[in-house]
Amino acid sequence: MAQMSRDLAIDLGTANTLVYAKGRGIVLNEPTVIAVDSRTKGVLSIGEEAWQMIGRTPGSIVAVRPMRQGAITDFEITEQMIHVLLRRVGVGRLNRPKVLICVPSAITAVERRAVKEATRRAGASACYLIEQPMAAAIGAGLAIHEPVGSMVVDVGGGTSEMAVISLGGVVAMRAIRCGGFDLDAAIQGYVRSTFGVAIGERTAEAVKMAIGSAAPFEDEPDAEVRGREVSTGMPRTVVLTAAEVRAAIEEHISQIVVATTTCLGDAPPELAQDIMYEGIHLTGGGALLTGLSQRLADATDVPVHMVDMPLECVVLGAGRCIESFSKLGALFASAER
Ligand SMILES: Nc1ncnc2c1ncn2[C@@H]1O[C@H](COP(=O)(O)OP(=O)(O)OP(=O)(O)O)[C@@H](O)[C@H]1O
Ligand SMILES: [Mg+2]
């Protein structure tokens, strides 16, 4: 007997990929890393498995973050990723589900078509798109169909998106290529230029999560980091204060703050008033940075609420859509342009 196809929702983020299966919830949540055969350019594996292959294989295999520069720039890779991803969650000849993909709202019509085609070629019986801020708003439980303005700020790995939503549509938006990865790179750059020490990107990310901040906080701790002295190649430990890490990432934080205030400024006055009352909903892994919500609240003079599950919010919103395809069908029509 043919297996029943479970509809899927996919958030292919620059940092993390999540898949939601209808009736089951999140079935895959892994870093967006792929192992590529450098000779054939074929994708061998994705996610945790891609990490596992590194160092255990001949030198022709490399691990990369394909979406790093903002989602969906390299279509060949995107198509292969979707293909491998669908196989991983059981899509095959006998199981051809409908798939809903979360895409950045800045995506062009050509890119939309390419994503949909790639997904169908990878085995989906149909592919629908939903704009990420819309999915995030649904995931956060906002009343998106009401004639009331809501604002979502999503700080991801490679990008940050701000959107004002009303009556199921995006009314104003800003998207910048600046996210958590840029903060990590800024910390790496600071340690290198100040101490002459090279640290890895994962070390920099760990420092950011441990003591990074967008605004001063109480009892700021220091962090010890191990790296390699550039001049001698010898291992060295340096101590970083929370204040110097904050200064190192400030340039990027202020970009996120400015994009948020500009987006709010672009909203029609009535909707802006709703938002002043309702507040801004902050999501994405980058939103977890200490003090970011405070900075946004200070700059906009609007209350900022962190959503319940910032890393899962987008896929959970898309998941809610596939759970009730018929009820939310109008959304897809608009997103399907
Ligand atoms: N506690 C934390 N403090 C600061 N940053 C964090 C924290 N936890 C996760 N992050 C950062 O969140 C980012 C990943 O967020 P997320 O999974 O929302 O991105 P994504 O959806 O894959 O990216 P994008 O939306 O740009 O495509 C990473 O840069 C990670 O370092
Ligand atoms: Mg995201």
Image (cartoon, grey):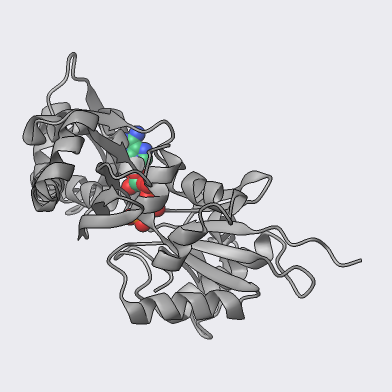
Which residue is depicted at the point 36% across and 65% down?
A: 71
Q: Quadrant of the N terminus?
A: bottom right
Judge left or right: residue 236 versus residue 330: left
Where's residue 318, x and y in %? Answer: 50, 52
Which residue is depicted at the point 31% across and 34% down?
A: 288
Judge left or right: residue 202 versus residue 184: right
Q: Is residue 280 above or below residue 24?
A: above
Where's residue 205, x and y in %? Answer: 31, 42
Q: Is residue 12 above or below residue 94?
A: above
> Which of the pair 73/298 is nearer the observer?
298
Which residue is depicted at the point 34% across and 43% down?
A: 146
> Which of the pair 57/261 is nearer the observer?
261
Which residue is depicted at the point 23% across and 56% down?
A: 171
Q: Residue furthest front?
A: 147
Question: From where the camera sits, is residue 159 visible?
Answer: no
Judge left or right: residue 117 versus residue 217: right
Where's residue 211, x and y in %? Answer: 25, 29
Q: Residue furthest right?
A: 1
Q: Residue furthest top?
A: 219
> Which of the pair 260/181 is nearer the observer?
260
Q: Residue furthest bottom?
A: 40
Q: Is residue 150 above or below residue 57?
A: above
Residue 123 position by quadrant: bottom right
Question: From where the camera sits, is residue 185 visible?
Answer: yes
Q: Quadrant of the C terminus?
A: bottom left
Where's residue 120, x and y in %? Answer: 59, 77
> Which of the pair 185/158 is nearer the observer?
158
Residue 125 position by quadrant: bottom right
